[in-house]
Image (tube, rainbow, N blue to C red):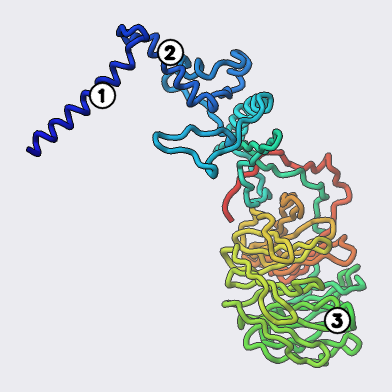
Amino acid sequence: MVEEVQKHSVHTLVFRSLKRTHDMFVADNGKPVPLDEESHKRKMAIKLRNEYGPVLHMPTSKENLKEKGPQNATDSYVHKQYPANQEVEYFVAGTHPYPPGPGVALTADTKIQRMPSESAAQSLAVALPLQTKADANRTAPSGSEYRHPGASDRPQPTAMNSIVMETGNTKNSALMAKKAPTMPKPQWHPPWKLYRVISGHLGWVRCIAVEPGNQWFVTGSADRTIKIWDLASGKLKLSLTGHISTVRGVIVSTRSPYLFSCGEDKQVKCWDLEYNKVIRHYHGHLSAVYGLDLHPTIDVLVTCSRDSTARIWDVRTKASVHTLSGHTNAVATVRCQAAEPQIITGSHDTTIRLWDLVAGKTRVTLTNHKKSVRAVVLHPRHYTFASGSPDNIKQWKFPDGSFIQNLSGHNAIINTLTVNSDGVLVSGADNGTMHLWDWRTGYNFQRVHAAVQPGSLDSESGIFACAFDQSESRLLTAEADKTIKVYREDDTATEETHPVSWKPEIIKRKRF
């Protein structure tokens, strides 16, 4: 009985299907009409026009629009043939209503605005496909791209930009490739040349500072002495003794006649330059003190140490105001400024920290470097700073440490950085090389490797510190061959004799 019911239902379904097929091919007079090719095309054209017409009104390329002009959507769909192995260029516009799928109706939430005006649609179709293809070809990676040693590695902006076109109350967006970034033309800077070598120390010269009056400068050395030199003549004026190990940092106060020094003997000293003797000691660091800096507006001294901390001292009372903890390795450099963040430290743990001076806590930790950070310099005019590491030099923007760009090419351990108000950034390295950069573009316009002092080994070529004098007309370097070298700009150089070897080529990007 069950089998008979099943057979009956199957026969019923087959009969109904055949009847529908018969009805489709019977004309009004009741006579059957054969299903020829023309009628099939006609039926397909009607179906396509009714259901898919709205999304087929736009040409796929500029050539189609020019040669064929506006054509019927149905004809373009039915008759257009593409040869094999030929790429067809399409573009996506997000403004056309999509036909519902079988049994799926569009709701109010899924419906998209109606079509744009014909003129707007045509102008958009003409502009985008060819421009996209051209830009894609221009930005395609290749192994022969030009890249100057000073070219920056700034984070690449997104390659696609959304272009919005308004027509009435609707907004139409399309994707278009953005032009690849290029290095802007750098400012021309005259080259610097060596004109004086000052000898007198018996060990590595580890630190250097110029006094505010620009009459003399001071150096600290591995021979445990601090020496004061006449800036104009280069002659020794005074030697100060008191440290029992290498002197690693010196700085002259702009607010009082004091000189501050620190060294690997864990000591931080304040020297009264009227009596040329130590008047204060700042005790607290547990290991070698690698650097120090003075706050420009308040009587605060900041030191950094191999004990992984930086300390803030009240200059007058010798009290330790804060101990800045957070680094996990030796803190190699520290810088102060009047604006927030007021203290910046670089460490051998590869991080840079921006500190809240009042709270004594970290505001921001920058972890972009992959190797130890031994040098930090603040730009004298811009609200930016740079950090030096063996991987590269990085530029940052205050107050949050936003990354600006990489300055790559100085492939050595960078010990020191300095910058003047003209935008000349100098980096000195452990191998005795010194690179000069244009701050704005990151263009490396000069490389210097001065010969070591006669009698020294070639391995003793190393630059530990450098500084511009107050007039920024002289550059002083403290070196491993026990000398101080003085550089100045070449007055005979011009843009014609020393042109900028720069080309507006696409910058090769890489992750930092």
* Residue designated by label 1: 17
Q: Earlier in the sequence, mark 1 or mark 3?
A: 1
Q: Earlier in the sequence, mark 1 or mark 2?
A: 1
- In the rendered view, does 2 fall on the left or right side of 204? left
Q: Nearer the viewer, residue 259 or 486?
A: 259
Q: Secondary structure at mark 2?
A: helix
Which of label 3 and label 2 is nearer to you? 2
Q: Secondary structure at mark 1?
A: helix
Which of label 1 and label 3 is nearer to you? 1
Q: What residue do we see at 61% from left, 18% from top?
A: 65
The amino acid pointed to by label 2 is Arg
* Residue designated by label 2: 42
In this rendering, is residue 279 above or below 370? below
- In the rendered view, does 492 fall on the left or right side of 44? right
Q: Earlier in the sequence, mark 3 or mark 2?
A: 2
In this rendering, is residue 50 above or below 277? above
**In this orientation, does residue 368 appear?**
yes
**Label 2 packing within 10 angstroms: few (<14), some (14-19), many (20+):** few
The amino acid pointed to by label 1 is Ser
Q: Nearer the viewer, residue 307 or 477?
A: 307
Q: What residue do we see at 68% from left, 78% from top?
A: 290
**In this orientation, does residue 455 appear?**
no
